[in-house]
Image: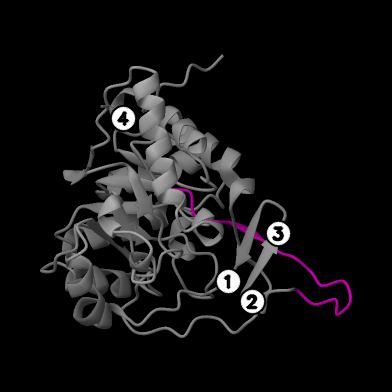
């Protein structure tokens, strides 16, 4: 049987399927459906230094081929995460990635610092959430901003540091290089694309935040293109996400250059999607004589 295990920035994952931040909470609801040890890892709900109530509703709406959301990083804060959620997660037998967000550089640094002596396996630096007025996206859209906040957090974070990049930029590869220069150990991409829908009767935006982040199958081609471009420019491992719903999507993302993948919006329509993707990937590898996931990574043959 083919080997599904991968190593990202020194962290061993039993398989390359990670539940994406923002779609899996802290995993408690999904643990009622299957053992979380079936997953390679969980990127937990975006966590900030202090509790955030999120944006006022409506903050989620369906779109053709996807979903538009502006939840606004609702979460109980890092101290609650460490005290209430992390002890439970430690017992689930999977890798724990803390997705960290903030409104200032000091917020990010302090939140990451509080996680130093915990059981968290990796910190994912969310500098790309488009749904808060003062938040990560302001750091994620310029080379200087990406490098600066990566370096500041790197200096105070003892955990492997993965930087989650925004697709809402002119050149994603430049942002990836900036994160690498700032000391990132890995990259994850893409976060959501900024979008907007309007109610034609009220003439108001459907989301109370006016704009939101587009995710789901509609963004998959954009994500694959960006992972391909980034993986050719940096030496860091890349975790690909954005619209992955099937094992075939996952294979595409790996071929584009990803070392592992995250599954997000698909979980809302099928909570078992990560398990089905893992099983489909394994069957694909066995059927094609692929002994290790790393043999697929970056295997695309461009024309």
Viewer-side label of 3, 1? 3
Question: In the image, which disc is placed on residue 209?
Answer: 2
Q: Is residue 87 above or below residue 235?
A: below
Q: Is residue 207 above or below residue 20?
A: below
Circle 1 residues within 10 Å: few <14, some 14–19, many ≥20: many
Q: What predominant SS class does the magenta segment belong to?
A: loop
> Which circle's residue, 1 or 2, is located before the other in the chain?
1
Question: In the image, which disc is placed on residue 70?
Answer: 1
Place of residue 39 in the rendered image (x, y in percent of width and height, measured from the top left): 31, 51
> Which circle's residue, 2 or 3, is located before the other in the chain?
3
Q: Is residue 174 magenta?
A: no
- The reply to whether the C-beta atoms of the residues labelled 4 and 2 are less than 8 Å apart is no
> Which circle's residue, 4 or 3, is located before the other in the chain?
3
- The residue that mark 3 highlights is 63
Viewer-side label of 1, 4? 4
At x 38%, y 39%, the residue is: 279
Place of residue 35 in the rendered image (x, y in percent of width and height, measured from the top left): 29, 59
Q: How far, Cα to Cα, is label 1 from label 4?
A: 34 Å
> Which circle's residue, 1 or 4, is located before the other in the chain?
1
Does residue 64 appear left or right of residue 80 in this picture? right
Q: SS class of the residue under badge 1? A: loop
- The reply to whether the C-beta atoms of the residues labelled 1 and 4 are less than 8 Å apart is no
At x 49%, y 75%, the residue is: 134
Q: Nearer the viewer, residue 12 or 99?
A: 12
Q: SS class of the residue under badge 4? A: helix
Q: What is the quadrant of residue 181 in the picture?
A: top left
Q: SS class of the residue under badge 3? A: strand
Question: In the image, which disc is placed on residue 293?
Answer: 4
Q: Nearer the viewer, residue 172 or 76?
A: 76
Q: How far, Cα to Cα, is label 2 from label 3?
A: 16 Å
Q: Is residue 193 magenta?
A: yes
């Amino acid at each position: 049987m083919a080997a599904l295990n991968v190593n990202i920035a020194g962290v061993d994952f039993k398989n390359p399927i990670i539940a994406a931040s923002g779609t899996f909470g802290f995993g408690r609801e999904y643990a009622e459906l299957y053992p979380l040890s079936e997953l390679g890892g969980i990127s937990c709900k975006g966590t900030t230094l202090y509790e955030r109530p999120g944006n006022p509703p409506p903050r989620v709406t369906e779109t053709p081929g996807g979903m538009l959301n502006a939840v606004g990083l609702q979460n109980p804060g890092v101290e609650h995460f460490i005290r209430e959620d992390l002890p439970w997660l430690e017992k689930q037998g999977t890798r724990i990635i803390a997705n960290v967000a903030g409104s200032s550089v000091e917020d990010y640094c302090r939140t990451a610092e509080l996680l130093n002596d915990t059981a968290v396996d990796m910190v994912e630096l969310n500098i790309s959430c488009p749904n808060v007025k003062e938040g990560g996206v302001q750091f994620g859209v310029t080379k200087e901003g990406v490098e600066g906040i990566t370096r500041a957090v790197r200096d105070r974070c003892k955990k492997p540091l993965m930087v989650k990049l925004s697709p809402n930029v002119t050149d994603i590869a430049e942002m990836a290089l900036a994160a690498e220069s700032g000391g990132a150990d890995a990259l994850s991409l893409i976060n959501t694309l900024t979008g907007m829908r309007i109610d034609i009767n009220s003439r108001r935006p459907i989301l109370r935040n006016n704009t939101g982040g587009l995710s789901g199958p509609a963004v998959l081609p954009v994500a694959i293109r960006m992972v391909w471009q980034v993986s050719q420019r940096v030496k860091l491992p890349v975790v690909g996400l954005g619209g992955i719903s099937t094992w075939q999507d996952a294979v595409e993302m790996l071929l584009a250059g990803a070392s592992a993948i995250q599954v997000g919006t698909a979980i809302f329509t099928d909570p078992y999607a990560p398990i089905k993707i893992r099983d489909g990937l394994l069957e694909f590898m066995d059927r094609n004589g692929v002994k290790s996931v790393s043999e697929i990574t970056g295997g695309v043959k461009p024309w």
